[in-house]
Amino acid sequence: MEFYIYENWVASDKAVIHYGTCPFCNNGEGTGRGSLGDKNGRWWGPFTTSDEAFKKAGTLNRKEVAYCQHCFKKI
């Protein structure tokens, strides 16, 4: 399993960790809808563990680091 981070500095100033298979991530390609390239954010990865992705996300200086609510559903 691979993990990716979407760093968004415009809409929400946060970094969100996704499974590569997440439909919002598409292995770091995103959805492609309304894509503005790197004007709003960018993808980082792949990472081999969610911990590795979380550590990298912490270095991006965003207000929030979160896990994708679609990928990491609460049980």
Image: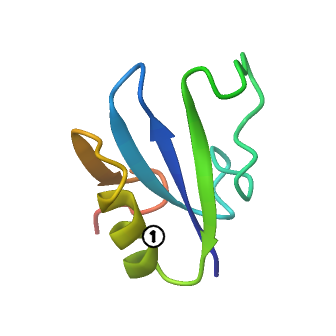
Disc 1 packing (10 Å; few <14; some 14–19; many ≥20): many
**Total label count?**
1
**Which residue is painted at 47% across and 42% down in the image?**
7
Locate residue 58, reporting x and y percent.
30, 60
Task: State the residue at coordinates (63%, 44%).
Answer: 24
Q: Secondary structure at mark 1?
A: helix
Q: Say whether residue 60 is left or right of residue 41.
A: left
> Which amino acid lies under the numbered mark 1 shown in the image of this protein?
Ala
Is 64 left or right of 39, judged from the image as shown? left
The residue lying toward the viewer, choosing from 10 and 20, is 10
Q: Position of residue 60 (x, y in %)?
A: 37, 50
Question: Residue furthest toward the left?
Answer: 63
* Position in image of residue 29 (x %, y %): 76, 46
Q: Is residue 48 above or below residue 67?
A: below
Locate the C terminus by quadrant. bottom left
Q: Nearer the viewer, residue 6 or 26?
A: 6
Residue 43, image x, y percentages: 61, 48
Dividing the picture into quadrants, the one containing residue 64 is: top left
Residue positioned 41% across, 66% down in the render: 56
x 70%, y 18%: residue = 36
Quarter the N terminus occupies: bottom right
Q: Which residue is mark 1?
A: 53
The chosen color scheme is rainbow
